[in-house]
Image (cartoon, rainbow, N blue to C red):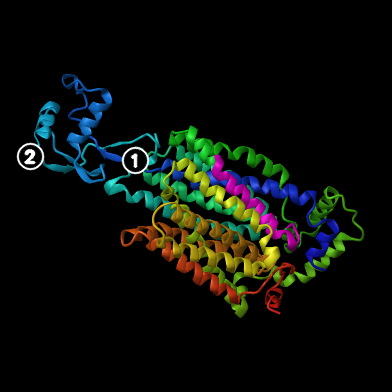
Amino acid sequence: MDFEKVLGIVGKFGRYQKGICLLLSLPMFVGVAAIFIQVFIAGKSDHWCKTTAWENDNCDGMGLSTAECAELKKILSVPVKKETDGEVEYEKCLKYDVDGIDLETAAAMYNGGNGSYTLKTIPCNEGWEFDTTTFPSTIIMEFELVCGKAYLTNIAQSVFFAGYLVGSAVPGLTADMFGRRLTLLVCLVLIPVMSILNVFSPTMWMYIILRFFIAVFVKGCNLACYVMGSEIVSPSKRAVVGNFVFTFFALGYFFLALIAKFITNWRILQLVVALVYLPVIIFSFFFIPESPRWLISKKRLSDAEKLLTKIARINKKEVTGNIMKSLEEIGETDDSAMKGSLKGLIHSRIGMLIVINMSFNWAVQSILYYGLSLSTSTLGIDPYISFMVSGAIEIPAYILCMFVPNWFGRKASTVGTMLLAGISCCLTPALPLGLGRALLAMAGKFFATMSFSLVYVWAAEMIPTSLRSSGIGLFSASSRIGGILVPLLLILDEVWESLPVVLFGVLGIVAGLLCLVLPETKGKPLPSTMEDTENLYR
């Protein structure tokens, strides 16, 4: 007997599964804030060199208002980099050397024209001033991450994805060894602990290190949630469950944008994001049990029987026969699975094919998703609204993913959406800047979101039970390597502004075509052993 038949006895998708899936969605919902908070606390704003020589001069003798005086000081102390169609762009890392020159004298020199304003330019040596209109308080302002230190913002983003890489591997192994529930709870507790410590970061390097650990535990939490959700339902409902959970992830964009709009101090915003985890921890501790599949794979049949009996009661199913006997039969079948390891997976020719193909695919999925997500500022609208739009695009994508894999199969759905995402990216440079290009780029984000969601379901259905968390963790680790590369790939816009998005598109098309050699898993039982995985090709 396999576990799907036991689910048929206790309920394949009843009140119990729906309630647990809702609870598993909560960590995903609040996780968005932990992941993307840097969009706001490291938001870029205009900046220029600070000049302290005229700080106490209020332009009284010139008859100027406070705003006009501030603008005059900027004009007289900061060189113009370029002027296009009346729009002036000032130097960000250079200023005029005005030491020993009072404001009125400098103004007279400037108004004299004919090249008479020829003061020497020097690097910023007194700090910077920032435009606080959009972002009143950021780490860029506090730690002055501009000019020679601007690279630290990209370092922080890459280090965060490196934490995602570790979080994909280590918690994946602990989830297989010590249980999905324990891994989930430990990660849920450590995320706010690290976030609260980050509130008091005195340096940028401490901030970066703590963000690394936040990423480790956020990824471990998300991985545990996804695996637990997929293991308590029948094959026909796995896509629905996965995308229901991811829909809450998309809704988290709105939550973060809303609190970031009203909490403008970056340290207070970080604290609020940490405290939001407290109710999620409480609900998870009291209401989320261990995965019955994991209990069976570890021969904890008595615990599995109690849990399955509870599931049947909540689902209002009458249990006929001996559940323990059924579990023992599954246990006998799963002996080889229990003794399995990732080494066993890659020693199989088919297993190796799946590992290599899925690892590359997940890396490309990450490049597509995060590359396009980090490019949303090109929409030319308020960054808070832009962030909401980025999340709004994902909601219909996740909803469609609840049905598309059951209509067309996992394979066709994943390949098709990857190809459409890649083609959209490649066509983007063909359109001029404006609405048309923006719509095409958003189409790419839409299909990239779908393909990233679909590949989670498909990959989970190709890996044996005892290796599922480790396998998904390995693929997820590959995706984080892609994430680490994204900030580096985006720099290629200095060569050609459309080069990054075209590269995203080419990679998407290649990865989509390579998936054609993998098996379809629609409607098939989750494999318990490597033999079951190999049978997917038959």
Q: Which residue is mark 2?
A: 114
Depth order, front residue of 445/473: 445
Q: Residue at x 44, y 61 (%)?
A: 428
Whether 521 is among the magenta residues is: no
Q: Which residue is mark 1?
A: 143
Depth order, front residue of 514/308: 514
Q: Residue at x 25, y 37 (%)?
A: 127
Q: Residue at x 72, y 44 (%)?
A: 287
Residue 312 disc label: none
Between discs 1 and 2, the one toward the N terminus: 2
Range shown magenta: 232-255
Say which amino acid is labelled 2: Asn
Depth order, front residue of 345/23: 23
Above or below for 125 versus 508: above
Secondary structure of the residue carrying tag 2 is: loop
Above or below for 79 versus 233: above
Q: Position of residue 193 (x, y in %)?
A: 53, 41
Image quarter hosting the N terminus: bottom right
Q: Position of residue 513 (x, y in %)?
A: 54, 73
